[in-house]
């Protein structure tokens, strides 16, 4: 039999998707599963967005669209960035693809040469490391401080002549931590000093609580020449399955991502483009009630977990996750997550998936009763667990 790629063989499937698959399989077999592992809101897409897609379908918008997104969609994104984020981009500095995940992968492919290094602060979104490896780059992980901020001093020690990129998400997945202005300015200083690209993943920007979302591009607009902003409509508009993601940055990199799009997914469907424009034009008010609901759940989740002996958490200011510290019970959160699922029917993502053993990521994007019941089961599991 012919051989296959050694590189791709070494990659691991997304642990969050694998966990979700296992939880769904157990549920299908009759188990009453509480799923804290899902990385999407539990509320549906707004009816006005759905209606726009249906109208576009009926109008015959079912053919190929342009690679990288149509001009009306890219213009709508530039208007959103200007009005909501105080960022100035032209339409030719924006590229749209099948979700922020695909856009991010194409960004790594467009930036990296074999062996070049990417600094990834812990905890990191599960796909960063493997996407970098698949793009023939070398992921370099760095630790976090107790408050969940990246360790800037450690980052400085990890810079080599091969370092090319720093990538991070704020609000952070999995911790929900929002990077402080001090942290963001520190990352900018490192990038400028060592002539690095910055990839700022801001997919959770709409889900920031008790403060305003701040981007590196707000603090130092001049970093635009070396920064790729990653965002999309999945989280802030409850449109995960619609797969609308985008990057904004210098044309030197955006044109390469667009070229890759022309050879991969080609385009997002035109009827989905129409729905995306509708969403972007509506703005954040469309989902404001849901954001208030998420904030109440966040407060409840923190209260309930704070009452569990041996458990702690990093206070989340954004996203919809609580990163629960179980290190006083066990450092092997992978083994514990299996114990939790198989014995208490609760799915939570182990910290190993995010480069941080001894933690569990639980999503509070579930109804209140489910949240209470699931955290009670987590408490019982921690009390009975023997590592």
Image (cartoon, grey):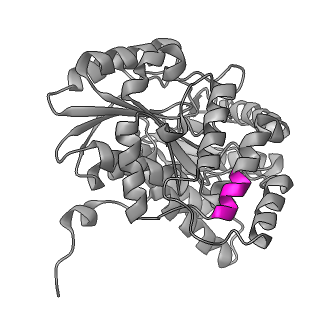
Above or below, 108 relative to 28: above
Q: Residue at x 46, y 54 (%)?
A: 102
The answer to whether residue 247 is left or right of residue 70 is left
Q: Position of residue 30 (x, y in %)?
A: 70, 77
The answer to whether residue 204 is left or right of residue 264 is right
Residue found at the very far left of the displayed protein: 161
Q: Position of residue 7 (x, y in %)?
A: 22, 61
Residue 275 covered by magenta stretch: yes
Q: Residue at x 47, y 15 (%)?
A: 220
Q: Residue at x 75, y 70 (%)?
A: 57
Give the residues drawn in magenta, as a range.
270-276
Residue 57 covered by magenta stretch: no
The quadrant of the rendering that contains the N terminus is bottom left
Q: Quadrant of residue 231?
A: top right
Q: Position of residue 142 (x, y in %)?
A: 32, 30
Q: Is residue 330 visible?
A: yes
Judging depth in this view, the residue of 313 and 148 nearest the camera is 148
């Amino acid at each position: 039999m012919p051989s296959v790629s050694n590189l791709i063989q070494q990659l691991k499937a997304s642990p969050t998707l694998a966990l979700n698959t296992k939880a769904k399989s157990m549920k299908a077999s009759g188990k009453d599963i509480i799923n804290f592992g899902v990385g999407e809101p539990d509320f549906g897409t707004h009816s006005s967005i759905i209606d726009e897609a249906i109208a576009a379908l009926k109008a015959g918008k079912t053919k190929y669209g342009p690679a990288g997104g149509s001009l009306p969609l890219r213009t709508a994104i530039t208007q959103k960035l200007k009005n909501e984020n105080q960022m100035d981009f032209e339409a030719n500095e924006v590229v749209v693809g099948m979700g922020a995940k695909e856009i991010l992968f194409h960004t790594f492919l467009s930036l990296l040469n074999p062996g070049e290094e990417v600094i990834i602060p812990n905890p990191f979104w599960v796909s960063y490391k493997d996407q970098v490896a698949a793009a023939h780059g070398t992921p370099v992980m760095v630790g976090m401080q107790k408050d969940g901020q990246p360790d800037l001093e450690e980052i400085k020690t990890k810079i080599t002549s091969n370092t090319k990129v720093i990538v991070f998400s704020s609000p952070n997945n999995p911790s929900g931590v929002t990077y402080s202005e001090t942290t963001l300015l520190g990352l900018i200083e490192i990038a400028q000093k060592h002539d690095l690209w910055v990839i700022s993943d801001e997919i959770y920007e709409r889900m920031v609580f008790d403060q305003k979302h701040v981007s590196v591009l707000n603090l130092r607009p001049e970093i635009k020449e070396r920064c790729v902003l990653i965002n999309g409509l999945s989280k802030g508009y409850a449109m995960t399955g619609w797969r609308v993601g985008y990057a904004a940055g210098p044309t030197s990199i955006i044109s390469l991502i667009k070229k890759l799009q022309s050879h991969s997914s080609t385009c997002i469907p035109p009827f989905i483009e129409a729905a995306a424009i509708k969403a972007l034009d509506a703005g954040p008010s469309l989902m404001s009630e849901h954001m208030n609901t998420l904030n109440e759940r966040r407060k409840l989740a923190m209260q309930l977990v704070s009452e569990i002996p041996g458990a702690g958490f990093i206070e989340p200011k954004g996203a919809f996750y609580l990163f629960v510290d179980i290190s006083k019970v066990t450092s092997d959160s992978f083994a514990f997550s299996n114990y939790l699922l198989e014995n208490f029917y609760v799915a939570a993502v182990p910290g190993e998936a995010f480069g941080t053993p001894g933690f569990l990521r639980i999503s509070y994007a579930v109804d209140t009763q489910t949240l209470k019941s699931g955290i009670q089961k987590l408490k019982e599991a921690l009390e009975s667990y023997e590592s």
